[in-house]
Image (tube, rainbow, N blue to C red):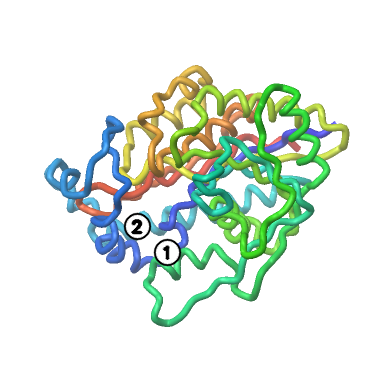
Amino acid sequence: MAKLVASFGSSHSIMLASQREDWQRGFLQIDPKNPYYYNRAGEKTDYDTLLAAAPPGAGEMVTPEKMSERFDMAQAAMDELRERIHAAKLDVLIIVGDDQTELFRNTNNPAFAIYYGHTIRNAKAVVTPKDHWTQRARMWRQEPDGDKDYPVHHEMARWMIRELCDRDFDIAAMEGLEPGQFEGHAFSFIHRRYLAGKELPVIPVIVNTFDPPNQPTPRRCSQLGAALRTLVAAYPADLRVGILASGGLSHFVVDEQLDHSIIEALKTQNTEYLSSIHPKLLQAGSSEIRNWLVVAEAAKELDMEWVSYVPGYRTPALTGTGLCFAAWRTLF
């Protein structure tokens, strides 16, 4: 039988595909234009309101020196996580991520989907010298030398879809991509940053975290994680399986209180807390916390052994991303 031997979590923010100078100067250019701001109570707001409400001394948190220090912390955390993923010696990695109108559109946007083709494509990066730095950062998630087809564990993915449907989950099944489509950023970031040079089969599990009105509740995300844990153990093949949450934590307003409460619940396996997070707190980029809820429940029989958290402030309005990286105990 298969065995879940390791679990991981990683933010995939554009911050993590950006350069040091982009952290120090670039976000001051683009954050004031971001239309997806919600305050820490989950109410819609805007940059000017956030800036006016920022505490005294907020500007000191985003000096070039502070930004550079946090950049180094995030890079070190990603290096550590990559080593842990490789050390787990996995046969397959289930990646739980979201789609932001990349493979799906609001004309047809499932709450849950699983991709079960034999491979999944990432596209060639298209970059010109005139491109804005944000375009260069987005393109870093894509391939430098041409389209690339990454292996998928087709048999296990297809089996999981059927088994989940038998357990009353409504799963959209994806056997391939249309011409011009390629895997979304939640998955391409993992391939490029953590799995580069490693032909590890994956199973992409796609959660609609971002786009209303059909985002799954936190409780339903935990239920999916529990089902995945059961199914991994029931799969009739001798496989070392890992599962990884891609995205989060809080953004586009950094909410350290929310982030640390989630990290503590992950450490203590507090399913009830994670399942009962109010959906108002999981809007815009913070919605990706749902991916961590799935993985946390799937990894319920493992202990979290390492976590790194970087409060990724990037403007005096305290906009940014709560950058988090974690690994649950690997069983050898």
Q: Secondary structure at mark 2?
A: helix
> Is residue 263 rendered to the left or right of residue 155?
left
Q: Which mark is residue 129?
A: none
Q: Where does residue 299 sit, x and y in percent of width and height?
A: 63, 30
For marks 2 and 1 on the same chain, the one whose residue lies earlier in the sequence: 1
User: The N terminus appears in which quarter of the rendering?
Assistant: top right
Label 1 sits on residue = 18
Indicate the position of residue 294 as horizontal and vertical percent values.
Answer: 58, 32
Q: Amino acid at mark 2?
A: Glu
Residue 138 drawn at (x, y percent): 47, 64
How packed mark 2 is, by other alpha carbons closer than 10 Å (few <14, some 14-19, many 20 or more), is: few
Q: In front here: 124 or 12?
A: 124
How crowded pointer 1 is (Cα within 10 Å; few <14, some 14-19, many 20+) is rated as: some
SS under mark 1: loop
Q: What residue is shown at x 45% (from left), y 66% (from top)? A: 137
Query: Residue beneath label 2, please?
Result: 69
Q: Which residue is outermost to the bottom?
A: 129
In screen coordinates, is 328 left or right of 274?
right
**Residue 220 image-quadrant placement:** top right
Residue at x 42% of width, y 43% of height? 309
Front residue of this view, candidates 55 and 14:
14
Identify the amino acid type marked 1. Ser
Mark in the foreground, 2 or 1:
1
Q: Is residue 149 left or right of residue 321?
A: right
